[in-house]
Image: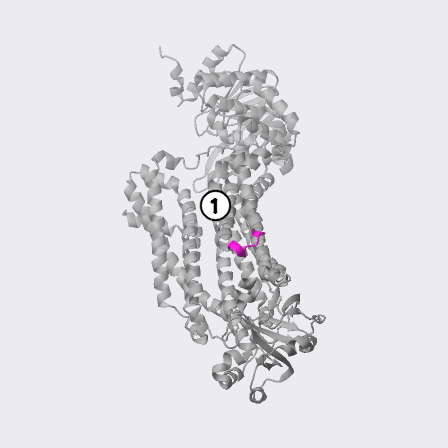
Amino acid sequence: MSLSKLAFQNLKNMRQNVMYLGAVTFAILIYYTFLAIRSNEAMLQANELYGKLGTVFTGASVILALFSAIFIWYSSDFFLRRRKKEIGLYALLGLERGQIARLIFLETMGYGVIGLILGIAIGTVASKYFVQLLASVMAMQVDATFTISGASVIQTIGVFLLIFLIIALRSARTIYRFTLIELFKAEQQAESLPKVHPILAVLSVILIGVGYYLTGQPLMDHFTIVAPLLMLCVILGTFGTMSYFTIFLLRLLSNQARHFKGTNLILHGQLLSRIKSNAVMLSTITVITAVTLTTVGTATSIYYFIDQTVEEQVPYSLSIASKQAEAEQLIAKSDQKIESRTMVNVKNVDHQMTDLPNPLTFTRYYATYAYEDQPGQFSYVNYSDYVKLAKANGKTVIKEPKQGEAIVLETFKGNDLLKMKVKSPVGVKIKDVYESFRITAATNLPIAQLYEKQRLAFVVNDDAFAKMPEKGFTLTNYQFSDERHDDGLMKQLTQLYGKQADTEMAAYYPVYAMTTATTGLLAFAAGFLGLVFLLATGSIIYFKMLAEAEESKQRFAIIQKIGVDEKEQTGIIRRLVGFVFSLPYVLGLVHSLVAMQVLQKLLNYNIVRPTLLAIICYTIVYLIYYIVTVRAYRRIVT
Amino acid sequence: MIEVKQLGKVYPGKVTEQPLTDVNFRVEEGEMVAVMGPSGSGKSTLINLLATLDEPSWGSILIDGVDTATFKRKEMTRFRRETLGIIFQEFNLLDSLTLGENMLVPLMLSGKKAKLAREEMEQLARRLQIDDLLDKQVDEVSGGQRQRTAIGRALIHTPRLILADEPTGALDFQATKHVMDVLAELNATGMTMVIVTHDPQVASYCNHVLFLKDGSVQTELFRDEPRRIFFQRVIESLSLLGGDEHQLSAIRPT
């Protein structure tokens, strides 16, 4: 029988290897689906923005490819371990190493080809439904059809053939490295008992602590230094914890009375004998879990708060600074009704930036845009108009600023640093004629969304306002009956203002549509990656535990012989698998909660609910993996 | 103590295996019984049945007059944990634990207090002369030491019945002698033992030998003479049963 025939025969022996094939197919399926979604014609036509956001997808697909490689690496490791004995037998029967290596290579490639065919076929179907889902989170109308994207197929095949080539080479190397007897005794090799390094153990936990502590510090000042340092601390700490602290903990435990209770002795022995080879996997999974939970949590939070974000950025359906009559005519012709109309007098004042106390941060953030393209322009509103606006918006009215005082119309959400600087009694000096204002209060009452263009606005008392020499103008804000819908009014309005559209008008709908599309896409990409990471980490633990089960068969046979009944054995397996699953899960969760707490500060929303949602989903999938792994483990050792 | 009646065991499969057809024998309290026979005669199957690790296809095993087939799952576990101690050929020590911990496992399973258990274990270890090896890993000690640890594990809960499946099968001559001396000493304290072996040397330590062939007991020997003479009788019986002459290699033909 020729080698290729033997390889083919082995391929046909599917039942043994159905899990491996499943893993390979899954990786290919995900990758292809992702590419197919990106290049979906219907989506590209429906929204030009979609094409521009392709970079999000490109970045994600690179991560996916890397991840697939790691994932297939782990599953093939399990696959090869399981077959060590069989390989040893081939060698004993007189096959040369080169021939065996070729055999394994052929098989790996065979699985790759089957996986590619299956993955692309299923991916074609799956991508249709994913496109529909994506369209709905982006608030778009798209008719998704089953299409095969040629470019995606070619890219998938290219990427995965490369991955399989690497894996096949690695398998071949394994075969060359091991002696015959090692292959045969693959299952009996006991790991040497790990040494305890108490100092390293404590050090790694301290490293994580330092990382956590750094998140509590104001990041903005030295973000580029602090952020990588923080990540490095946490990642190093995680690897250290998994490698040293767990051993330390288990050894510590073996001096306790609990250690000797019931089956604990057996459990601890098994855990300790495996911890060394599991440490790298566990820490990798911890880091991935932390990243995934944070990404998904962030994306869900942002998506969850789209409405609120847009509402804050653009509080009115439409704000205009001129041509009021013409604009209202257009509105009357459209299907929108004006529900309310507020007007406010505004004066824009040029400041000599250098005159401002603490001017630097101020100007960097707030002089980005000014009416006449002059930097350093601030807007002023008089107190009477402010009271009118506040009442119309249902906000509490702050008491009138005295001479030399001002209220700033901005709460500096998520920008603690700026908030502190503005709130502190610094003055705003107006030209050389006027005295400076001391800012006494802050409120989130935008006078118009023209100010989404980020110009600071202040309320001063009526006297001070009247004394300002600049010419005032009227801003009109409208609230429409249905601001999330547009029948072409926006286009007409833009045409009306022509070149001045940027400065003279601002509307809710375009911002809303744009934000929904971008955050929807981001949330989708994050969710998709999160799902993949979740499934992949779960599967990696699954495969690793099964490989361990295969190698611990003999131990469990002994355990059964010395009088451990089935119930107790199941208990041991449950706790064994539970330990391996919960370690990266708990540590990853804590990492991401700390990261999310920073996010909460930045966003300044209450992100508990969306975060909780993401965590619950994650937990459920993890639990399912846990149950499946326990069952498979039991099946192998009994 | 043990009474085996018309015991049979069949392993169904494509080729039906029938290692035991009709086995009958009695083991009295305090006896040391050797079960001999050529490979494939069903010795290990018999031990597995006695240890309730396997169920008989027909016939019955009475332990203290109670049929093991009537044991409920809990009684079975209790029987294995309290009455029974098993010694295996390949030691079956958990390589993830130290020797001391291995010996402790049965006590822990029955829920004994850790401190008390440790004391008992150390005492037993002194008797088996492995008390200075207790913190060693399994792969750091010799075969004889491993087997003595395994015996220690089988004895730690002071069982009334010891079942041993080729306890010296993996040991050299010196270690065999040592292990058998320990077992004989224990038997002298009144512990009942059933030892499966193909080594006449081992059988000569016993006071009752069963010869198993073709699924049933062919001959039984009872010892009432010094060990050296009993050894000769065992060998004679073996050669009478045939097919086992090669085991006589210890004797130079005259």
Quadrant for the N terminus of chain B in the image = top right
Is A474 rendered above or below residue B177?
below
Is B22 rendered above or below residue A83?
above
Q: Nearer the viewer, residue A70 or A554?
A: A70
Q: Which residue is mark 1?
A: A281
Neighbor class of circle 1 (other Cα within 10 Å; few <14, some 14-19, many 20+) is: some
Q: Residue placed farthest to the front in the image? A: A433
Quadrant for the C terminus of chain B in the image = top left
Q: In the rendered view, does A445 fall on the left or right side of A373?
A: right
Residue drawn at (48%, 68%), measured in percent from left and top?
Answer: A129
Q: Give the residue type at disc 1.
A: Met
Residue drawn at (39%, 23%), measured in percent from left and top?
Answer: B243
Residue B77 location (% of width, % of height): 62, 34
**Residue B158 visible in the shown view:** no
Q: Nearer the viewer, residue A602 or A148?
A: A602
Residue B169 location (% of width, % of height): 45, 24
Q: Nearer the viewer, residue A8 or B161?
A: A8
The region drawn magenta spans A215-222
Report if residue A217 lies within the magenta region. Answer: yes
Report if residue A92 lies within the magenta region. Answer: no
Q: Nearer the viewer, residue A324 or B128?
A: A324
For residue B190, what is the image quadrant? top right
Helix, strand or loop at mark 1: helix
**Residue A507 visible in the shown view:** yes
Residue A589 location (% of width, % of height): 57, 51
Is A529 rendered above or below residue B161?
below
Q: Chain of mark 1?
A: A
